[in-house]
Image (tube, helix red, strand yellow):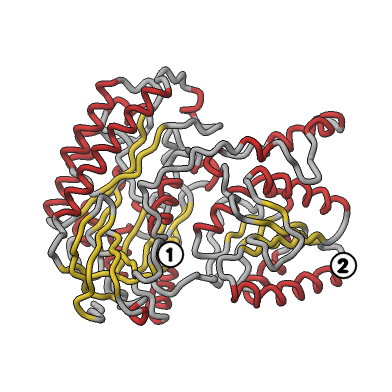
């Protein structure tokens, strides 16, 4: 499993998609999918063709976190242009098969459709845009379908702009250099709420005014900054996403106002490390607290932000959050470990004491605050005593829930070079013990909701039962209840009848609650 705040942030988005964070990953062996290849890019042949080719193919090791992504899904690739494009299609087909997808020769039953394009003639370009026009109806029928444009055309700025303006049903645009990133691009497209564009460009750009093709009209994600400068030793994000760069406040405020006007009820401000927002501004002193203070005046029922870094979580932000209103009192605050020594090796740049002091400040200013966190167990050289420090910190803070992970090295990070002397069975045992504590406290916290009335933002039908609706409270608790479909997208009052480990069951007490 991949590590780092970025991945955890994605886990949160998964949860917001009504996926239970306690769900166990399937134990199925996916290795068989690597034994069959569709028109195979052969490593053996590649070696004969010279070094360049081999190093290129070395990039195609599929990250563990993506194994089985394509289970039950089919892919379709339409190729335009020359043999190089054909070769690229073969490589992409190989990757799709490695991910567990099945090939199909019909767009009708495909789950992913890629148009691999050519830029030589205008005629080829027109064909692609014509095809995108046809696929629009298909996307309307099946919103879960992923449509991607790749190849040579996608590396032209004018083409990308045209797709952004005229073909907002496209989910992914990536270039010829980015083919090896296909699992990441697919993963991002499944989880993202906007178009995934990955064509190599210089680091440090912040592109504004791009139209966004958002799915749904209840919750929206707004990027406020890109990149990360923290360089935690286990995390690849600073290397892949570049340096911290903040969007201008006026652009963000305008986007949030626009979303409010469209009727969105909840907005989450996103960044690899949202607390560092504004630190790169040279012309003004303006941070996340200042931004939140302005955004809270906009007529949106709920405002959240993620992912936080404890090191940058300042008093100004706490002061603003304490004003309440539409600023929710649920804060995701990744701690990663309860041991100061491990935090030091992780390069988190805060100690256990610093973190606990921050929690104390938050709880003092916002007595109703609920905290969730991320924890890595089994970091290289973690002792039993250090793990116990994580357990005692968890008990002391009493988090509402946590995303927990066994440490796994990411190639290219400093931690990957550390000698890991913690056996896997010890790591697993620690994770088990931590998860038992997480479940115990989560269940206890949820128990307190029984008999209480909560405000729920109704997102849609429950994944398990279409007769039941599901939505989240301010504190991000998933509530299932029976109600007419007409309340989807509304804020409603629900009386909690039963608390489970991760979710609440209830009954609606009135049709709609007044929007704050």
User: Which residue is denoted by mark 1 in the rendering?
Assistant: 222
Name which quarter of the figure residue 310 lies in.
top left
User: Which residue is denoted by mark 2 in the rendering?
Assistant: 121
Kindly report the distance in space between the C-alpha atoms of the residues bearing marks 2 and 1. 37 Å
Q: Quadrant of the C terminus?
A: bottom left
Kindly indicate whether the residue at mark 1 contacts the one at mark 2 (C-beta within 8 angstroms).
no
Q: Is residue 239 above or below residue 126?
A: above
On screen, residue 492 versus residue 251, left or right, reads left
On screen, residue 148 versus residue 299, left or right, reads right
For label 1, the crowd category at 10 Å Cα-Cα, with few meaning under 14, some 14 to 19 and many 20 or more, is: some
| Badge 2 or badge 1: first in the primary sequence | 2
Of residues 117 and 499, the one drawn nearer to the viewer in this rendering: 499
Report the residue at 46% width, 22% height from top.
418
Of residues 170 and 157, the one drawn nearer to the viewer in this rendering: 170
Of residues 280 and 508, the one drawn nearer to the viewer in this rendering: 508
Q: Position of residue 340 (x, y in %)?
A: 27, 29
Q: Secondary structure at mark 1?
A: strand
Report the residue at 88% width, 52% height from top.
83
Q: Secondary structure at mark 2?
A: loop
On screen, residue 330 versus residue 164, left or right, reads left
For the image shown, how many numbered marks are present on the structure? 2
Of residues 307 and 510, the one drawn nearer to the viewer in this rendering: 510
Q: Position of residue 144 (x, y in %)?
A: 56, 65
């Amino acid at each position: 499993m991949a590590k780092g705040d970025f991945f955890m942030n994605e886990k949160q988005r998964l949860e917001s998609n009504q996926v239970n964070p306690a769900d166990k990953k399937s134990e199925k062996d996916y290795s068989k999918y690597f034994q069959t290849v569709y028109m195979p890019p052969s490593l053996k042949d590649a070696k004969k063709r010279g070094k360049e080719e081999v190093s290129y193919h070395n990039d195609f090791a599929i990250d563990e976190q993506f194994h089985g992504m394509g289970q039950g899904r089919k892919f379709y690739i339409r190729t335009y242009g020359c043999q190089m494009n054909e070769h690229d299609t073969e490589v992409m087909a190989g990757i799709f098969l490695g991910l567990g997808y099945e090939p199909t020769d019909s767009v009708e039953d495909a789950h992913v459709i890629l148009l691999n394009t050519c830029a030589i003639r205008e005629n080829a370009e027109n064909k692609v845009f014509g095809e995108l026009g046809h696929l629009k109806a298909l996307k309307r029928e099946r919103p879960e379908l992923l449509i991607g444009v790749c190849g040579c055309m996608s590396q032209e700025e004018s083409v990308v702009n045209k797709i952004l303006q005229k073909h907002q049903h496209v989910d992914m645009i990536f270039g010829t250099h980015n083919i090896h990133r296909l699992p990441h691009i697919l993963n991002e497209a499944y989880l993202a709420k906007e178009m995934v564009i990955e064509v190599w460009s210089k680091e440090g750009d912040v592109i504004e005014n791009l139209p966004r093709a958002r799915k749904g009209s209840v919750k929206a994600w707004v990027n406020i900054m890109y990149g990360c400068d923290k360089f935690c030793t286990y995390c690849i994000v600073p290397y892949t996403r570049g340096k911290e760069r903040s969007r201008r406040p006026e652009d963000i405020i305008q986007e949030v106002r626009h979303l409010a006007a469209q009727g969105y009820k909840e907005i989450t401000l996103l960044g690899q490390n949202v607390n560092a927002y504004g630190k790169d501004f040279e012309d003004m002193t303006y941070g996340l607290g200042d931004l939140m203070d302005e955004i809270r005046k906009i007529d949106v029922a709920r405002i959240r932000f993620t992912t936080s870094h404890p090191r940058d979580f300042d008093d100004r932000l706490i002061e603003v959050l304490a004003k309440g209103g539409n600023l929710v009192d649920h804060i995701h605050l990744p701690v990663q470990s309860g041991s100061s020594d491990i935090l030091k090796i992780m390069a988190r740049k805060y100690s256990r004491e610093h973190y606990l002091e921050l929690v104390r400040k938050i709880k003092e200013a916002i007595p109703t605050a609920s905290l969730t966190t991320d924890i890595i167990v089994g970091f290289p050289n973690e002792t039993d005593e250090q793990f116990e420090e994580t357990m005692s910190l968890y008990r002391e803070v009493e988090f509402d829930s946590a995303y927990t992970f066994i440490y796994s090295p990411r190639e290219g990070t400093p931690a990957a070079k550390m000698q890991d002397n913690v056996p896997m069975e010890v790591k697993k045992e620690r994770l088990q013990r931590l998860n038992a504590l997480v479940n115990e406290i989560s269940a206890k916290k949820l128990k307190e909701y029984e008999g209480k009335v909560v405000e729920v933002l109704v997102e849609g039908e429950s994944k398990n039962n279409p007769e039941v609706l599901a939505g989240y409270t301010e504190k991000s608790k998933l509530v299932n209840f029976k109600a007419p479909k007409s309340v989807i997208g509304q804020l409603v009052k629900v009386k909690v009848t039963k608390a489970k480990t991760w979710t609440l069951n209830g009954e609606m007490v009135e049709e709609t609650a007044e929007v704050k």
